[in-house]
Image (cartoon, helix red, strand yellow):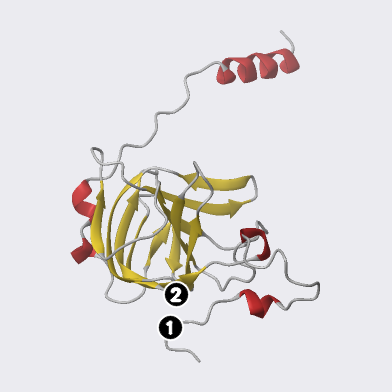
Amino acid sequence: MTRRAVILLVAWWSGCGEPPPAPPLPDPGSARLDEAAGGPVQGRIAGRAWRLAEARFDVVTRPGRQRVDLLLWDEAVERCGLPIERSGATVWLRFPERTALEPAEHALDAEEGSFEVHYEVPSEEGFIESHRGVATVRIDEADERAIRGRLRVCFADHDRSCVGGTFDASPCWSRIDGRALREPPGLRDEALEPVRRGGP
């Protein structure tokens, strides 16, 4: 058998094997709020240090697709609502079938599915993603201008990624979110940004 035939046979055999098992969910106890950092959300994602630089929330009100997304980035974000390439890691929590969050504590474990946790990290191969985990989120204040609270999230990945701490999220508005679709051309991006709590 030629060397090339051996390589092709090994490649074929490797492709026919069972996919590696998904990592198990972390222990729900790892997502206790008292395990979270004392300051802004920080931890490790996909084996890398991660620290919150910007937090936003996005409210989707389209019929049948209502949700609130709490979006956390480790870099400053411009044009929040636009699907543009970003170099940092994104962590987000999705609360489906809701258009607002009220002050309350929410827990996510193997039994509870009232919200979802995700992260996405760019890599040379595309994106490293995780869409399973355990979490506790406490919303302390919430209105149309800000959502403040504390969270702890641990993901079901091979790196045992976890982040936790406090956040102060402002709205995620953009032209594609209906905020300025009817505005005249030349509108500055700054005009799409909300006035942050405590601002002018």
Residue placed under numbered mark 2 in the picture: 145
Dividing the picture into quarters, in which one does residue 177 lie?
bottom right
- Residue 121: in sight, yes or no? yes
Q: Quadrant of residue 151?
A: bottom left
| Place of residue 146 in the rendered image (x, y in percent of width and height, measured from the top left) | 41, 73
33 and 137: which is toward the camera: 137
Q: Where is residue 62 in the image (x, y as percent from the top left)?
A: 54, 49
User: In the image as oriented, which residue stretches furthest toward the bottom?
Assistant: 200
Task: Indicate whether 160 appears above or below 54.
Answer: above
The type of residue carrying mark 2 is: Arg
Residue type pointed to by label 1:
Arg
* C-alpha span from label 2 to label 1: 7 Å
Tag 2, which secondary structure? loop
Residue at 49 percent of width and 72 percent of height = 54
**Labelled pair 2, 1 in contact (Cβ < 8 Å):** yes
Residue 39: mark in rendering: none
Q: Is residue 46 visible?
A: no
Mark 2 or mark 1, earlier in chain = 2
Number of the label disc, if any, that sits on residue 197: 1
In this view of the protein, which residue sits in the foreground, 68 or 161?
A: 68
